[in-house]
Image (cartoon, coloured by chain):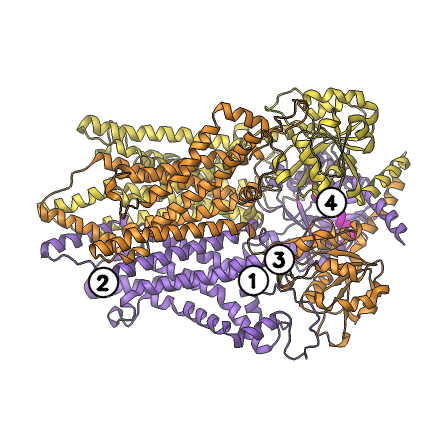
Chain colours: A orange, B yellow, C purple
Amino acid sequence: MEKPFLKETSFAMKMSSSHNQETVCVFGTGDFGKSLGNKMFQCGYSVVFGSRNPGLSGLHPKGIEVLSYAEAARRSDLIIVAVHREHYNFLTELAEELNGKTLVDVSNNLKINQYPESNAEYLAELVPGAKIVKAFNTISAWALQSGTLDASRQVFVCGDDKEAKQRVMDIGCTLGLTPMDQGSLKVAKEIENYPLQLFPMWKFPLYLSAALCIFYFVYCMLREVIYPYIHEKKDNTFFLAISIPNRMCPGVALNLLALVYLPGIIAAILQLYRGTKYSRFPNWLDHWMLCRKQLGLVALAFAFLHVMYTLVIPIRHYVRWKWSNSVISQIKTNKTNPFNVTNAWLSDSYLALGILGFFLFVLLGITSLPSVSNTVNWREFRFIQSKLGYLTLILCTAHTLMFGGKRFLSPSILRWYLPSIYVLSLIIPCMVLVLKFILLMPCFNQPLTRIRQGWERNLKGSKKAQLGNGNTGV
Amino acid sequence: MEKPFLKETSFAMKMSSSHNQETVCVFGTGDFGKSLGNKMFQCGYSVVFGSRNPGLSGLHPKGIEVLSYAEAARRSDLIIVAVHREHYNFLTELAEELNGKTLVDVSNNLKINQYPESNAEYLAELVPGAKIVKAFNTISAWALQSGTLDASRQVFVCGDDKEAKQRVMDIGCTLGLTPMDQGSLKVAKEIENYPLQLFPMWKFPLYLSAALCIFYFVYCMLREVIYPYIHEKKDNTFFLAISIPNRMCPGVALNLLALVYLPGIIAAILQLYRGTKYSRFPNWLDHWMLCRKQLGLVALAFAFLHVMYTLVIPIRHYVRWKWSNSVISQIKTNKTNPFNVTNAWLSDSYLALGILGFFLFVLLGITSLPSVSNTVNWREFRFIQSKLGYLTLILCTAHTLMFGGKRFLSPSILRWYLPSIYVLSLIIPCMVLVLKFILLMPCFNQPLTRIRQGWERNLKGSKKAQLGNGNTGV
Amino acid sequence: MEKPFLKETSFAMKMSSSHNQETVCVFGTGDFGKSLGNKMFQCGYSVVFGSRNPGLSGLHPKGIEVLSYAEAARRSDLIIVAVHREHYNFLTELAEELNGKTLVDVSNNLKINQYPESNAEYLAELVPGAKIVKAFNTISAWALQSGTLDASRQVFVCGDDKEAKQRVMDIGCTLGLTPMDQGSLKVAKEIENYPLQLFPMWKFPLYLSAALCIFYFVYCMLREVIYPYIHEKKDNTFFLAISIPNRMCPGVALNLLALVYLPGIIAAILQLYRGTKYSRFPNWLDHWMLCRKQLGLVALAFAFLHVMYTLVIPIRHYVRWKWSNSVISQIKTNKTNPFNVTNAWLSDSYLALGILGFFLFVLLGITSLPSVSNTVNWREFRFIQSKLGYLTLILCTAHTLMFGGKRFLSPSILRWYLPSIYVLSLIIPCMVLVLKFILLMPCFNQPLTRIRQGWERNLKGSKKAQLGNGNTGV
């Protein structure tokens, strides 16, 4: 009974295992073609190059042949087209040789959306008889040569022919890459744009924080540098280096952190209002929600800068001068400042709240590292990002309130009718915390929970039997 | 007997190679069913929903049909049951349609161990003719909808039929998830409990550190707040914000760090005593050893807080008042404190040891990140976690000893017979270091090494030929 | 033409789906053999042990048989040889039973390059009829037993028979490991050396930084401790704990950071000189370029220490004494130091530059975490590591220049003709920045860009049609 099984096995195995002896043809002996071809050769494939001038193509490892395009195409049914899009037209002449074969488009463009259709779709038009697969465009020639795949090993693959796509994905695996099936050839445009992107999800957070920075900086400069200069002729310009950044950073950090939680609150209000979670959110809200993680990390960066700026305070020349001056003037006037327990309490609790808030903030940052967030389940992830996140926001808001302390709304701190910057910084965080508190009241929280489990106000409870998997956080 | 099996398989497989054209049926149009179905549809599967009220099921993308359960079941041989366990009984009526087909149980419960048997096993009882696979319960509806799989992409899959399991795993891969085969259907209970867990490995470290915190806090409060209040009528309550936490944090951090290394030492003593490594450790020791990483990370968190609390010292109102007061009193009494080299040495070396200890501690923390520890081999991992870990413990213990400095055991620091808190903090770390030192002596280290390589005292060397692979760290 | 292909595929598929019922034989009941066998048994394989003394082999889970070598070998065509190399010779007697079967060599040595040929090749010589696969040697027995695979899950696999190799890789996958095909059996030596390595890529950076540290330390000691002792009889020995490390760390950090960017500049000059990117770099340059990441991380460690050493300055006993002494002497001499805006500017901008530089440095460190760098594309990775990296270098160099401030080259700071240490630290960074600036000028940058896209000066532009994939950074 075992025998036939074994026999068949060996047969099956020969097949699946012999794929490495496969011959792969690479059109084009440019930098990328060469690197990819050599890498496949190293990984056990038999490689043939096709070139316009087979004689001129430089050095290749022993065992790799360089032939004319037509000859090379005849050798293999999988052809990697490592040629610029502008030179694709020579392929039309090879229509016969390429018929039924798999053509892998590995090209990139210089600009996003450079051409109306993607290179891979253009190739499909030129060679209608071939199966086109888009792949390998996210990998760099240098990475293939040096073996240091520090940036992403992901190879996005798309194509209309499943089988051809699978073969290309197998090659990717053998080269030590991580192929990801992205679907049909229509996705090729996206895949071609991918390597040209520069942090698309970070754009909104970075622009937003840049705008906030400029506003805060100018505002503080007015109050702390220009006002004293005009009214008291004091040269405070050196405040620009540390004092003003150290007012700007905490303000920006606190506001960005509040803006991480604002879209969730807006979404909750929308869902309550609409009575369903199945209507789409407006686009701006969708986008805002998708870049909350980035917003939070930018906020963490500003919080980190704030911490550093604060900790160097006692080393600053200006501060040391001011402190020793205050001691000297106490002695000269023979008036010793008495110790004030309230001030000690305010100063210590303001610092303690800041430390705890920063600690939780760092914790949130660490858990948003991909390798850490991959090890937690949904319940844990939501516990951290939602519960701990709100705790961080509360601590940081309290830290700012304490910083104000007694002088919080005393009119004496107005300059040109401008309040201190930390008063402005508190507006959004306090608003978010109040709204969240309101939403937590049972009259809002209960319907919201039901809506997020899939309940719809307009459907008459006919769907209680359906599964809402619990994990329905926003 | 093999033949029909083969035939069906080959059939099934042909299908799976063109698997994306496969039709998948989803029972239940609730939140999770909808999300999963739509996601599969996007990934190229042909999807059919089964519903009690096919007409009432809300909007679906074009191309997705909603049919009655029976009709839908007839369309596909892979059915995803996205219905709450309480409503499973309708499936008994479909026994005929479901016979021989693959049923995927995706359900979760609300509480851990809510039912005596797992939902998947219950399903298997109800529909004995079907092949049951448990999967997808760790994924959230919202993650599927939004595409942001920040938390784990892992899909734990189990089932008794390998083939059915493989098909479900293939679907998981196509959806961009990471299926993990967990074995037979008996594991279903564990898989169902998984998404309900909240940091199970962190419980012991967190409870332990909470207990230590409370003890240290109360102890310090007695010595630093209540004692001065009773004896000198001094209001030191503001010490609660920073001074006392800054005595509590380093103590807790140091003790937790020592407790990371204590179980290894106990295990070594047990192994030496028993003369074998093959007897099981007591359960408490096993559990303790498995959460050493978490203990260490909690210790690092306290060390981080200690560093922050220490660095803000010169900014504190109280400290600034004290320092300037000391200068003023020096001038008033006309006695200038002379510079004391020994004190400078003590203060500087105490700080330097603390800095180096914290630096190594951070290094240990970084290397315990999953993506970092995945890039090192066993020898490197053990070098860091064992050698560097002990070095950290030594540095931190020395830092605490230095902090005591001259006044270490002077009776003048006793208050109500209570010694300073740092004296207590040193007990466990010193004990661990002494025991480790003893175990490193050749008379203990040599037999221990042999035991860890698989040698057993009671077996008479008959097994020298066997392989002990070197990597046998505890 | 399509038909036969599909048929074979379907065949292949069938097999792989029933692979878990496979019987696997393990030779040797030592620590590692036991652990691996039990793990495979847990994962659904049928496991048979082969042992010299089947009766003496200790406890095994129910369902696992322990037989003699010959009997066990007859049960399976995949045999894991978990025996020390020194005892391999018994396998020659089993030549008949092992003929045509797959032997998996899992052994490790005690030293790198212990034997002239790898254990796997030695095994292949002993049993010429078997297919040898090297695997599993990077996994530890303890990890298999406890299930905590904190260190790498990677299983490096090599072998000359593709089919056998594939089967072993499938087993690795089933055990939850990550098999990596490394090629033919010739690689076995490398794979056997791998678990014995201790941070090979870190050696050069660590030795280099150790040498720099010693140089800086001795240099500073001469200037700051020995010189004052000889000339002024001052006991500055306590400077060894913090003051001198805090001059050494920033110097080492800055120089290492500059050395991260120097090899790229040397490579660019070489490429410009040779007119091609296809000539190999000298070995030292290659190695230097491959460990740039490690160099940068060591530099970050020193920068972190520098930050900590700097932030504790105001807590130091010596510094507090000095500050209060300066206040006291101001009062006694009745000369109050006037406030100097230039000094405030210098001190603040020096600190601000340092903070920003350190912030970017930390950002570079975070993006070099494997899980982070895996989520960015090449363009993003190069933006961070190249653009942000140079910005960090510029900020840190400016920070050091500002630190010098007014007294930068004043001869009064020479002691024994030795300039201050920060002057020396600036040499390499300034050189790197100047060279980079020169290379950015169009007359050098344009040909360099073309060369990196695959252009060669000596080939006459015949290859314009070829693809250079854009991603060609050094």
> Magenta segment, which residues?
C158-177
Disc 3 from disc 1: Cα separation: 23 Å
Subunit of label 4:
C
Provide the residue designation for mark 4. C170
Q: Could you say where residue A268 lies in the image, as x and y percent from the top left? A: 53, 33
Report whether A409 appears left or right of A260: left
Q: Which residue is at the front of the view, A381 or A415?
A: A415
Give the residue type that dot 1 points to.
Leu
Which image quadrant for residue C146?
top right
Check chain identity for marks 4 and 1: say if they share one: yes
Q: Is residue A338 magenta?
A: no
Check chain identity for marks 3 and 1: say if they share one: no
Disc 4 from disc 3: Cα separation: 33 Å
Give the residue type that dot 2 points to.
Tyr
Provide the residue designation for mark 1. C290
Q: Which quadrant holds the C terminus of chain B?
A: top right
Provide the residue designation for mark 2. C229
Report whether B99 appears left or right of A300: right
Provide the residue designation for mark 3. A195
Q: Is residue A210 placed above or below B386 in the rendered structure?
A: below
Check chain identity for marks 1 and 2: say if they share one: yes
Give the structural element (helix, strand or loop) at label 3.
helix
Subunit of label 2:
C
Closer to us: mark 2 or mark 4? 4
Q: Is residue B372 placed above or below B456 in the rendered structure?
A: below
